[in-house]
Amino acid sequence: MLDGDYELFIKKIKKKTGIDLSQYKEAQMKRRLTSLYEKRGFENFQEFFQGLNNQPELFYEFLDRMTINVSEFYRNGKRWKILEETILPKLLEKNKRLKIWSAACSTGEEPYTLAMILSKFAPLSTFQIHATDIDDNVIARAKLGMYPERSLQEVPKDIKEKYFTKEGTFYHISRDIIKSVQFKKHNLLAEPFETNYDLIVCRNVLIYFTEDAKEILYTKFSDALRKEGVFFVGSTEQIFNAVRFNFSSLDTFFMKRSKAATHCYNSVIYYIKALVR
Ligand SMILES: C[S@@+](CC[C@H](N)C(=O)[O-])C[C@H]1O[C@@H](n2cnc3c(N)ncnc32)[C@H](O)[C@@H]1O
């Protein structure tokens, strides 16, 4: 690899796409991308960048590789059970019209799981379910609502019968579920967050980010929640010293935005970091 090869590539990708690779853990990202360019016959990141400019297929492959899209319905089933049996009933006591965000939703399994669970409580038109991801491709696939058998492994039998139809080797998800989710492209690391969410689900993406990026995101997620709103994280993503971000623990992997407004400190840190960047 050339000296400064990866650093220059980061700059060029940022200019071309707005995606800031420097906020992803370097060793891991470099390894993923190097194995892709070597597989495609390039010798270094600069040649690879030329290739990305000339070959749209390669560019999509790059996006796929850098964004790590694996997902499935009811991923880590026990957590969804806690959401259904403990967290949602409490949230619904306070507000019947929940506003929910699946951040980094990949191909839609996560927001659709939310919709399927919420449909047990009230008609889906009662809820706002937002789902975002940085990758256009996964959003297009989510809207299609077609999944291979392996994505459905953890789906409870009654839900599978109610909301999925098998066609060949794929399963189609019902129109009602698809219609209940609003998908949008959104880069967590670069764009502002909407606010007043009752529940934010952000799982299996923060692990790819640097510690600095994570700190900023925790602050932004906390600010995006209503008081007492809940933040649902992935199984390897427990927040260290959560109180700093105004979170208190509700259950493993579920944080509540606590009442006291202590955001001053966090916001100051956040803006200082943004200024020096
Ligand atoms: C492993 S998937 C997680 C999907 C789902 N949340 C789950 O747990 O099953 C990670 C997703 O994060 C998305 N992602 C990566 N960087 C992102 C960013 N900066 N902003 C928004 N989404 C991002 C990827 O495109 C990918 O779809």
Image (cartoon, rainbow, N blue to C red):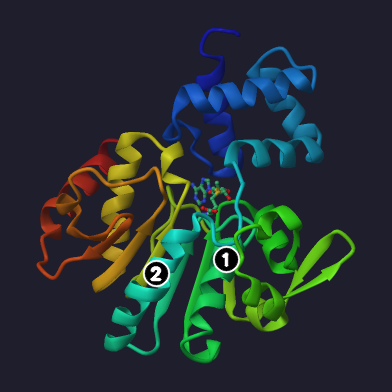
Q: Position of residue 194 (x, y in %)?
A: 39, 68
Residue underneath mark 1 = 184
Q: Tell me which residue sits at (77%, 35%) in the image.
A: 58
Say above or below: 62 vs 142: above
252 and 258: which is toward the camera: 252
Labels 2 and 1: the sequence-earlier one = 2
Say above or below: 124 vs 10: below
CA gap, disc 2 to disc 1? 24 Å
Q: Tell me which residue sits at (68%, 72%) in the image.
A: 160
Q: Which mark is residue 83?
A: 2
User: Which quadrant would the N terminus be assigned to in this image?
Assistant: top right
The kind of residue on which mark 2 rests is Leu
Say above or below: 109 vs 63: below
* Secondary structure of the residue carrying numbered label 2: helix
- Which of the 4 image quarters holds residue 156? bottom right
Q: Position of residue 80 (x, y in %)?
A: 45, 65
2 and 201: which is toward the camera: 201
